Image: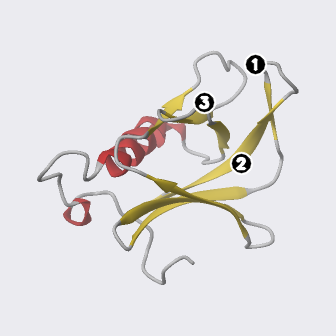
Amino acid sequence: MASSRAPLLQFKAGRCFREGDTNTVQPDPTKGLVYMEEEDGLMHFYWKNRTTNTVDDDLILFPGDAELKSVPECTTGRVVMLRFKSSSQKLFFWLQEVNTDRDHIILQQANALISQGEEDGAGNFEDEDVNMEL
């Protein structure tokens, strides 16, 4: 269950799905929102349908176990991949933000949140510019 506080990070993004067993992904036209919240000491990665307002994905990310990175092979859009290090699971999203200037900041901040707690004394991001809503 998502908390009532503001998410640590959120950005508009749709999902992409793999075509069968190929390395090609197709974007789902559904308007979506990715957001991250810390709940009971665990980092949650949510994907919500912006039309129906329902949360379709709620993933728990353990410190350092995942990485959000751009997919440079995609030349027709702004696709990012959430790759898990402990398994072969990969989830694909296409950025739906109008402004492309902050794409790299989204990736940096998402990865900083995923890494939070990986080392002793990891930074507290509440004082930094992580409460970003694009």
Which kind of residue does numbered mark 1 sit on? Asn
Instruction: Quote the CA–CA distance across marks 1 and 3.
Output: 13 Å
Q: For the residues marked 2 and 3, what is the alpha-carbon distance in whole angstroms? A: 21 Å
Query: Which residue, given by chain and number where applicable, does mark 1 sit on?
Result: 23
Q: Position of residue 6 (x, y in %)?
A: 43, 75
Q: Would you say the residues marked 1 and 2 are in contact, meaning their CB atoms lie under 8 Å apart? A: no
Closer mark to the observer between disc 1 and disc 2: 1
**What secondary structure is marked by label 3?**
loop
Which residue is labeled 3 in the image? 88
Indicate whether 71 appears above or below 134.
Answer: above
**Most foreground residue, 65 or 11:** 65
Whether residue 110 sits left or right of residue 81 in the image: it is: left
Task: Tell me the amino acid under the disc marked 3.
Answer: Ser
| Disc number for residue 62 | none
Q: Is residue 47 left or right of residue 36?
A: right
**Which residue is disc 2 drawn over?**
14
Q: Disc 2 on helix, strand or loop? A: strand
Q: Badge 3: few (under 14), some or many (20 or more) residues near its Cα, within 10 Å?
A: few
User: Dot 2: few (<14), some (14–19), or many (≥20) neighbours within 10 Å?
Assistant: many
Structural distance between the alpha carbons of marks 1 and 2: 18 Å
Whole-percent x and y of residue 65?
42, 40
